[in-house]
């Protein structure tokens, strides 16, 4: 998925070796990204890349992404990719395609091996990529993962490659009747001894910050206040259908209040998706919130208001845990003048929420792919760090 304020990712994964009692190579793998914002969309109508059944979520004029630089092959070829928790495969533009983010040429790598034909992925914004499944050696932040399966795209319409780090049940290979799953990046990090538990912490940092991180295999205890609350994942897919076990990061959101007054009081599943910019809610809730603060705008498909509108901070409650989101995080600039803003809660068109950046900036979340749960806390914006292995 993709989000809104435009983000630029210079991702440098760095290895932190502090606080590591573990022997061997278990180290927190930290991917730092920098954030660049703009109100101009490089492509029309992109907002979210929802994998699988693909709800098309569109918003003009706001765009952002996390770009990580990965090194593929031997000798290494550098490719910059969009890091996405809303999908589960890595694919890169192969030789014969073009991308300003770099391409990968398998004929120049001694560690390439083709696995099979039939790589195909499509996203909610309509973009897609097709090609072959291949194995490679991949280096990210000083960590080298071997036999890493990915999509070597021979055609693509997305622009840049995508580095999906979601659950294996949502891999593109698993879609359809003859589907299969494979050990994707988070799983291979564990298989190859870099992390103890398949999971990572997401810290987007504040609205004004220019960097944040994904930290594999560890939690940075300095970056949240209070405790982390464990929430079980809900077993539904992106179409809202029940599935046997969780395939995406849906948790149950019980209520939203603002200034102590209820805005939404019925529970719905909520997808914690870094690849989405705004917040999407069941339509009645989106309308109630939008009309309280703005006027409906056909062109934005949502409620617009002046950027100087003052509102209350929102409280999102999950069981007994409340995450507070400042009003300013819920207003999204829609033009360069900075005068007109969109109330950042739009209709999901489904019986669930998608909590994108607008929400995620205020939270610190450890995504636990092994135990089908997340641990969520109120983000604390600080340079300090206290990294503990999970
Ligand atoms: C590709 O890598 C997987 C491990 O991810 C391994 O099981 C498989 O045998 C490899 N296939 C080829 C053709 O190298």
Image (spheres, rainbow, N blue to C red):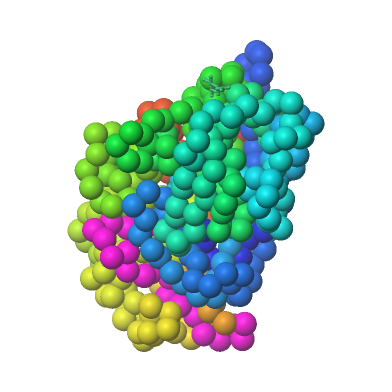
**Residue at 70% from the left image edge and 43% from the top image edge:** 104
Left or right: 100 as drawn, with respect to 346: right
Looking at the picture, how far across and down is residue 114, in whole percent?
Answer: 59, 29
What is the residue that sits farthest to the top in this orientation?
23
Q: Is residue 190 above or below residue 258?
A: above
Residue 349 sits inside the magenta stretch: yes
What is the residue that sits farthest to the right in this orientation?
75
Left or right: 117 as drawn, with respect to 99: left
Left or right: 211 as drawn, with respect to 176: right
Residue 204 sits inside the magenta stretch: no
**Residue at 63% from the left image edge and 48% from the top image edge:** 93
Question: In the rendered picture of this protein, how many numbered marks are placed on residues?
Answer: 0
**Residue at 53% from the left image edge and 66% from the top image edge:** 4
Looking at the picture, how far across and down is residue 329, in whole percent?
Answer: 50, 67
Write the start and end of the magenta stretch as one range.
Answer: 336-356
Looking at the picture, how far across and down is residue 95, in whole percent?
Answer: 69, 46
Q: Quadrant of residue 249?
A: top left
**Residue at 64% from the left image edge and 67% from the top image edge:** 37
Q: Nearer the viewer, residue 347 or 312?
A: 347
Looking at the picture, how far across and down is residue 352, in whole percent?
Answer: 28, 56
- Which image quadrant shows ligand 1? top right
């Amino acid at each position: 998925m993709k989000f809104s304020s435009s983000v630029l990712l210079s991702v440098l994964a760095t290895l932190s070796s502090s606080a590591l009692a573990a022997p061997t190579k278990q180290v927190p793998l930290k991917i730092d990204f920098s954030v660049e914002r703009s109100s101009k969309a490089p492509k029309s109508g992109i907002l979210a890349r929802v994998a699988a059944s693909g709800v098309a979520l569109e918003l003009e004029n706001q765009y952002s992404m996390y770009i990580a630089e990965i090194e593929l092959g031997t000798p290494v070829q550098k490719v910059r990719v969009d890091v996405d928790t809303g999908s589960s495969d890595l694919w890169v533009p192969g030789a014969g395609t073009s991308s300003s983010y770099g391409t990968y040429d398998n004929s120049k790598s001694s560690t390439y091996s083709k696995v099979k034909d039939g790589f195909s992925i499509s996203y909610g914004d309509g973009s897609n990529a097709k090609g072959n499944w291949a194995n490679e050696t991949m280096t990210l932040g000083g960590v080298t993962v071997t036999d890493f399966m990915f999509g070597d795209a021979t055609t693509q319409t997305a622009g840049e490659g995508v580095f999906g780090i979601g659950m294996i049940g949502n891999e593109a290979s698993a879609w359809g009747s003859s589907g299969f799953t494979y050990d994707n990046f988070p799983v291979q990090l564990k298989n190859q001894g870099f992390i103890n538990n398949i999971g990572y912490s997401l810290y987007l940092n504040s609205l004004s910050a220019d960097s944040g991180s994904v930290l594999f295999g560890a939690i940075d205890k300095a970056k949240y206040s209070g405790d982390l609350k464990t929430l079980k994942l809900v077993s539904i897919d992106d179409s809202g259908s029940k599935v046997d076990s969780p395939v995406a990061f849906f948790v149950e959101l019980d209520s939203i209040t603002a200034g102590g007054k209820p805005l939404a009081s019925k529970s719905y599943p909520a997808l914690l998706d870094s690849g989405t910019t705004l917040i999407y809610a069941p339509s009645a809730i989106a309308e109630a919130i939008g009309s309280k603060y703005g006027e409906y705008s056909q062109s934005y498909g949502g409620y617009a208001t002046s950027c100087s509108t003052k509102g209350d901070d929102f409280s999102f409650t999950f069981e007994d845990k409340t995450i507070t989101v400042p009003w300013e995080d819920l207003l999204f600039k829609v033009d360069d003048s900075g005068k007109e803003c969109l109330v950042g809660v739009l209709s999901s068109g489904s019986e669930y929420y998608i909590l994108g950046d607008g929400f995620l900036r205020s939270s610190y979340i450890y995504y636990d792919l092994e135990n089908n749960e997340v641990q969520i806390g109120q983000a604390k914006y600080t340079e300090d760090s206290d990294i503990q292995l999970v």
